Image: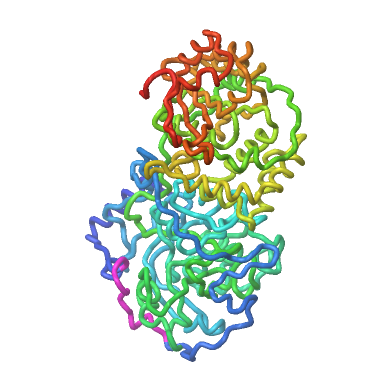
Amino acid sequence: MPLVMPSGLRLACFALVALALGCGRSSAERGRGTGGPAVSAAARTTGTQGTATAGPADRSEADGGTAYDSENAGTDREPRPRAETRSSEGEDDSGSENRELRTENLSPARTPEAFVVCTEPPADMICIPGGPFVRGSDDGNADERPRGEVTVSTFHIDRHEVTNADFRRCMAAGVCELAHHYAGFNNDDQPVVAIDWINAAAYCAWVSKRLPTEAEWEKAARGTDGRTYPWGEDPPTCERAHYADCDPRASKPVGSFTPGPWGISDMAGNAYEFVQDWYSPCYRGCPDECGDDCFGTDPKGPCGGAERCPGRDRRLLRGGSWFWESDQVRTSSRRGMRPDSRGHRLGFRCAVDAPPPGPVGAPQPPDDGIAPLTPAEREAFEGVEAEALRARPVDARHWTNSNESDHALWFPTVAGVGGGYLGVGSDQNFSLFAAARSSFVWLMDYDTVVLQANRIYRALILASASPQEFLLRWDSFERKVTEAVVAEAEAGAEDLPELLAQLDENFEAAGNYFHKVAARTEAGAPGSWLADPALYRVVRRLFQEGRVRIVGGDLTRELPGRIAAAQAALGVPMRVVYLSNAEQYFAYGDAFRSAIWAMPFDERSVILRTVSRWLPDRSRHAWHYQVEPAAHFAETLRGGVERFSDMEEQATYVPTGGLSWLGEEER
């Protein structure tokens, strides 16, 4: 029976061995992060040196790095700008205190050849021991030649391809971007696709890893015995890999097939995997060969893997995919692809040195204070009964083309006030309750079209990790996937056909509107929930934790009173009431007065309303964004005022619009 030591004891033993031997890092390993690697003459081969010739017929015109997509999955678009890394106030996406270091960094034990000894790898990674292996093929395509031996140092590589769930966390942090949502490719456990080399590298850096080099990838796929496929020499079948002849015509969940020689999954088919290297038409023996940069110890390919490589415009893909034929799932098969290419078959996995130079893993998000509802809170919050409303016809003016565009004027007033939030209308509320960091949000309206719009937005927000992804949902290419997201989220709803009809009729107008919302600024700062990833995260988290109620009712009837009673039962003040310009259309009846008096306001509570007034030249109306202390409004109602028009002249207005106050000077 073999002796098995606990991992901590093994680490201690390896450290003692290293100290006793006085092992230092080899010169070859020290050179991994510098220019070109040292070239070992012994590692070169004298195999076939013929010039590159055209490979077998492809399924696109040499693909040209354009990532051609099948007719039922669309075509790639022009590359989008790389997402800027952002973090909300107080958030540090690179803080090492949020990551777990799983390997010992000091004096690692080494083999007699001076390679680091494999110990326990970081979570969900496999350690590949340093040493030589057989790379390439003289029987495959010209770009795989010549077959020969190269050496890589010990490293770790991801056990599985990066999944949608993994990548969404990077998108939520504002680091990564997705090109498209392809139907059939969006489950959490499927490999993420529709990413380019740029975003693959950005993700690996975000988790303190890197893309594997081509040599590392091939050693991980074929082991040290030169095998043709990860499983050996038997020909491909749909039980061994996922390629063009297999069903479904989409990627399968990671880990669906028997692992290869080191226990690594999906290195044949499923998603094509970007690696670090620039593409060359052969290793040696053809025009534009890679040459010495592809030989020796730890080769990094043309230009030593530098960010720019004159004369090279394609990065490398390895492993084949569900879209291509079985010939490309060979361990030595190579394919060049433009680094800005995206498609429904392009994925990746990450690697890291052994031992890692620092903590490995995604940064932990900061505690945002948005917790799940307690049972008592849920009972009070969800127990409020909506009113029966008359169905209204679908009308795009109710939800896509709001002409109130300057809600950021209220940000200084509501910033961080917390508490309850009550608002009428649709997405304009999102900017306000996010800025306020409200704990309970009531979105009410008497118009079923507005209520349905909010439910559509909720479904898409929950499915979209970032503002960029939410905006992507409104791309014409995304239409069917967006409809499927809403249909799944609202499955079982009696009015689902109306929801989908509304989405279909207003899809283009809504997309145009939301792109305008995402471009809003105020005094040089982001001016909406879609312009600021930090505000978007608050909106999404509140929806995720069930702290936003979308409920139908009329301001002049029973619902506001029910909300007031529920908010009081929750023991949290109602801090913000947003009325838009609704008061221009009704008188203050008994039900409305009673609801305002019953609201659990405190000294920080405010009423927000918009007021439309003519410009001095009478050319058009301008919106005034008004603030009134809630206590002042409640007292005014006790004085018998009948309509808002009876008191609106008391407010101080800027003739061309802007912020105005009623009841006291600006705080």
For image coordinates 64% across by 56% down, the residue present is 476
Secondary structure of the magenta portion, mostly? Answer: loop
Residue 37 falls inside the magenta stretch: yes
* Residue extent of the magenta highlight: 32-45
- Viewer-side residue, 584 vs 18: 584
For image coordinates 62% across by 47% down, the residue present is 510
Relative image position of residue 494 (x, y in whole percent)? 77, 34
- Viewer-side residue, 169 vs 271: 169
Query: How many numbered marks does the figure carry?
Result: 0
Residue sitting farthest toward the top: 639
Above/below status of 596 relative to 485: above
Above/below status of 582 relative to 524: above
For image coordinates 56% across by 20% down, the residue present is 377
Q: Quadrant of residue 311?
A: bottom left
Relative image position of residue 100 (x, y in whole percent)? 38, 44
Q: Quadrant of residue 562?
A: top right
Above/below status of 417 relative to 32: above
- Viewer-side residue, 70 vs 448: 448
Above/below status of 428 relative to 565: below
Could you tell me which quadrant the C terminus lies in? Answer: top left
Relative image position of residue 232 (x, y in whole percent)? 58, 70
Q: Is residue 663 left or right of residue 239?
A: left
Residue sitting farthest toward the bottom: 50
Residue 199 falls inside the magenta stretch: no
- Viewer-side residue, 220 vs 477: 477
Q: Is residue 328 left or right of residue 503?
A: left
Q: Is residue 206 left or right of residue 269?
A: left
Q: Can residue 462 be seen from the camera position used here?
A: no
Relative image position of residue 13 (x, y in whole percent)? 32, 51
